[in-house]
Image (cartoon, grey):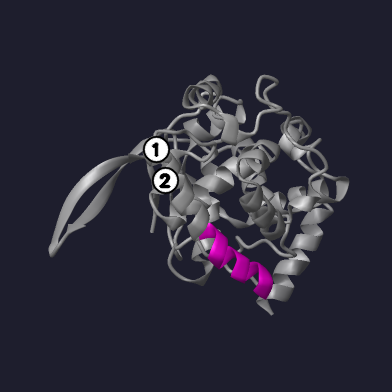
Amino acid sequence: MWKWLRNRQRKLRSQKPLPHFLSRLIKRPDLSTWLTDAARVKLINHARNMVAEKNWEGLSGLVVTEEMKWKIALQASRLTLGFDDSPFDSIQSILIYPSTYVAPQQTKLGHIVVESSSLRLGEAWKRGPIVLAWEDIQREWEGHEPFHNVVIHEFSHVLDMANGDADGMPVIENPALARNWISLIPQQFAQLVQRLHSGHSDIINSYGATNLAEFFAVSTEAFFSSPRLFNIWHPELAQLYQQYFGHTFYSTSWPLHPQYSMINPSQFTASQTSDYLSSHRYLNHERYLVG
C-alpha cells in the first residue's frame, strides 16, 4: 500500500514544472553531454524525488535552499542510473553543515575506548542520516576538486551498507558480477596499498587504502569524476563499475589532459604522476566517517 501511494505521488510530481534553475545546473558535462537523453530524464526524476521526499536540514545556522538540494540530489542520483528504482529510498534525512565540522570520535585501544573529536567532510550511517559539508560540495561543483566528490563518496557508503556493515560489497543481484566483485575488489585494493607504499601516486586518493569500504567509496569518486582517465589507470575496475552502475548510459567521457592523453599509467614516473595530480588540485581528504 505504501509503495503504491509513493509511486502515485511520484507520478503526479513528474507532471509538475521543474525549477527554473535546473537548466543552468545540468549544463555540467557529467549531467548533460556525458548522458544519453534517456539517462538524463531518469537522473532528473530520481533527483526530483530525492528533493521532495527527504528531510533536508541545515546545521550550525545554514539555510538550505532548493537549489542546494538539487545540486546534492543530482550528484547522488548519478549513482542510481543502473537501477530501476533509486537505492536511496531508505534514507530519511540529509543534514548539511556550512563547512568542515567537528564531530565526536571513539577509538578502541584493546579494552579501552578513547573519546576524541575529528574534522569531517561527511558521514554516512547505517539506518541513519547522510551528513555533508556544503563548502566542499560547492567547491567540487565549481570544478576545484577533481577526482573528489563528497556526495558520491557518502552515498556510495549507503550502497555498501544496504546488506549490512560497510565492507566494500554492496548488494549485487547478478551472480557472475558478484563473484567478479568479490575477487577483483580485494585485489585492486591490495595493488593500491602496494603502489602507495612504493611512493607512487594514483588517480584513487590515498584514503582509499584505509580499508575495503573506503576503497569502494574513494574509487567510485574517481570513476564518476573522470571515467575515461579512470579506465586508463584501472581498466578492470572500470569495467566492473560500468556493469554495476550501468555506466553504458553515458554517451561520452571527460577529455584527458593533453600532456598525458596518450600515456599509459604504467609509464608514468613518480614525478609525472605527482605533477599531473597536483596540477588538478588532487588533495588528500581523510575526513570522512562511515558507521
Range drawn in magenta: 175-185
Tag 2 residue? 194
144 lies left or right of 49: left
Whether pointer 1 and pointer 2 mark residues with C-beta atoms closer than 8 Å, the reply is: yes
The circle on residue 198 is 1
Residue 226 quadrant: top right
Q: Quadrant of residue 64?
A: top right
Q: Is residue 182 magenta?
A: yes
Q: Dot 2: what SS?
A: helix
The C terminus, quarter of image: bottom left
Count up the numbered dots: 2
Q: Is residue 69 visible?
A: no
x, y percent for residue 185: 53, 58
Percent of width and height locating residue 164: 46, 70
The Cα atoms of the two marked residues, 1 and 2, are separated by 6 Å
Q: Residues within 10 Å of mark 2 (few under 14, many from 20)?
A: few
- What is the secondary structure assignment of the residue under circle 1? loop
Above or below: residue 74 compared with residue 236? above
Q: Is residue 242 magenta?
A: no
Q: Amino acid at mark 1?
A: Ser
- Answer few, some or many: residues within 10 Å of disc 1's Cα (few below 14, many 20 plus, some between 14 and 19): few
| Residue found farthest to the front | 267
Residue 119's disc number: none
- The quarter of the rendered structure image containing the N terminus is bottom right
How far across and down, in percent of the image, does residue 13 sit?
A: 77, 56
Residue drawn at x 80%, y 50% as measured from the top left? 249
Query: Please, what is the three-letter code of the amino acid marked with disc 2?
Result: Gln
Magenta part mainly helix, strand or loop? Answer: helix
Residue 238 appears at what percent x and percent y?
A: 66, 49
Q: Nearer the viewer, residue 285 or 119?
A: 285
